[in-house]
Amino acid sequence: MSSTSRGYGALAGITAAAVAVGSAELVAVGTGARSAPLVAVGGVVVDAAPEPAKQFAIELFGGYDKIALLVGTAVLLGAFAALLGMLAVRRLVVGLAGVALFAVVGVAAAVTRPGAGFPAALPSLLGGLLGGFVLWLLVAGPLEPQPWPTASPGEAPSTGDRPAPEGRRRFLTGAGLLVGAAALSGVGGRWLAGRRGVAEARSALTLPTPVSPAPPVPAGADLARSQLAPYVTSNAAFYRIDTALAVPQVDPETWRLRIHGRVRNPITLTFAELLARPMVERYVTLACVSNEVGGDLVGNARWLGVPIRELLDEAEPLDGADQVVGRSVDGWTCGTPTEVLRDGRDALLAVGMNGEPLPVEHGFPVRMVVPGLYGYVSACKWLVELELTSFADFDAYWVPRGWSARGPVKTQSRIDVPRPRNRLTAGPVTVAGVAWAQHVGIAGVEVRVDGGPWQPATLAPAVSADTWVQWSWQWAATAGEHTVEVRATDRTGAVQTGRRRPVAPDGATGWHRVTVNVR
Ligand SMILES: Nc1nc2c(c(=O)[nH]1)N[C@H]1C(S)=C(S)[C@@H](COP(=O)(O)O)O[C@H]1N2
Ligand SMILES: [Mo]
């Protein structure tokens, strides 16, 4: 095969793939964003990826790990499509078989996503059909730049290595128009899907007034220093962690919560029924088990919701039902000890975050929030089910992936100021940060410089033991390079361990340390 016909073939393959993916996006407007082939295949990759790969991706791309995965999938698809196009120039059936194979992969991924029905197959199916048609069009149909330039011995190239100019023009114009149409339908599909999303339902929602409002934030809880995390994290700044490549759009009109499994009285609630129940509002600090020492996967918000305890009391868990599995509309699960949800702490089915309906990416319309447990065992977003079962009988999403079934939060403290690159001059320097031991509470924070004696820091007041607390310490800094370390003590008197342990399987430990230069 000549390099010219390889080039045409590659272009034909990429055009076919673009048309397949672009048209599938448009079809997915009707069948749900998670049925679009890139999102469906990406979702399978996320669920199947070994834990170290996922951790690596989070470290490498941070909050952009999902975009990186989608772009990576698209680039891989493009490369395969180019290859298929080159083969199709030789034998069209080989190319068409390749397209069919991709369609099958897309269909298989889409219909096996949790909660997906038969319609989830449609985007990949129709995309595959159109992609195959376009491949034929460009390689063997009316747009073929005939005759195929060939330099193979034995075949008589009628026009040398290049097709006739009019054939070339027809091919390139056709391919260009098709790619344009594909892009339009892809972007248009995404846009339409966004309009069909739940943003409107969310902004139309008025939250009920809590029967038990959150205690006011005490004066001085927020030291209001730049670089220091504010006491209350805004919704916009709140960290986001989940496995969802397309944020689930759950319509509150059709939302149902099923409380079932090992209970005496199974319950089904509508959103209106949930909102009609007495609501409480509480400040609770949420932390991710993947938070490294000194990391920022932790935030404090004011949550409005219904105490889970009351719903469980009505459902009447049976003996031995020691685990409550929260299930998201996208199939993700977390397992929370039943006893923790019933021990009197403010475990909530939350509908509000900082005075607003939950942001869609934080679980609209309903999520769980449980003080004292890491998010992966308690904070199910887009919640649709609470299933009573036992830890012996069911492993939630992260457990077979190497994480502990139980995930109580570990006492942690963090230095927010100074940062390693701050310019400091000898003299008084304020060292400040946050510390958390949700539901137990922080009793004290200590700081030391260059491994010297631990010095008590000043704790700012906090709303409750369920939130983090800010701390500060005045340092008489001397010139030179210094290492500042922090540790907290919880209200049981336990001192935060200095032993360095990784985030897996149940949360990192160790003291946060910052090295600074004082001039
Ligand atoms: N449906 C769903 N809920 C989920 C997750 C998820 O992947 N899917 N991740 C959990 C994890 S690991 C954490 S730390 C919290 C984070 O909540 P946030 O994104 O609102 O900060 O959500 C939890 N709830
Ligand atoms: Mo997490």
Image: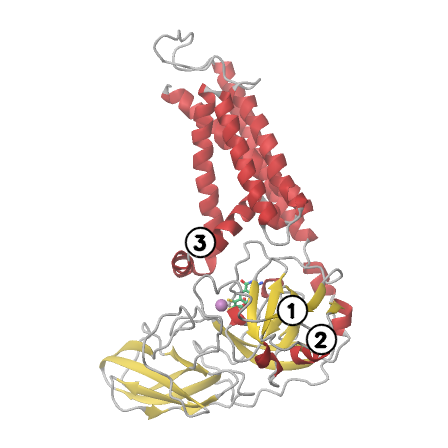
Which secondary structure lies at badge 3? loop
Mark 2 = which residue?
315
Instruction: Tell whether 188 sits left or right of 293.
Output: right
Q: Earlier in the sequence, mark 3 or mark 2?
A: 3
* Residue at 70 percent of width and 78 percent of height: 316
Instruction: Tell whether 26 sits left or right of 475.
Output: right
Q: Nearer the viewer, mark 1 or mark 3?
A: 1
Residue in the foreground of this view, choosing between 326 and 349: 326
Dot 2: few (<14), some (14–19), or many (≥20) neighbours within 10 Å? many
Identify which amino acid the numbered label 1 is placed on: Leu
Relative vertical location of residue 48 with respect to residue 142 in this rendering, above or below: below
Mark 1 = which residue?
386
Q: CA distance from mark 3 to mark 2?
A: 37 Å
Give the colour scheme of this rendering: secondary structure
Tell me which corner region of the image, top left, top right, bottom left or bottom right, holds residue 485. Answer: bottom left
Q: CA distance from mark 1 to mark 3?
A: 27 Å
Residue in the foreground of this view, choosing between 394 and 314: 394
Tell me which corner region of the image, top left, top right, bottom left or bottom right, holds residue 350. Answer: bottom right
Identify which amino acid the numbered label 2 is placed on: Ala
Q: Are marks 1 and 3 in contact (CB under 8 Å)?
A: no
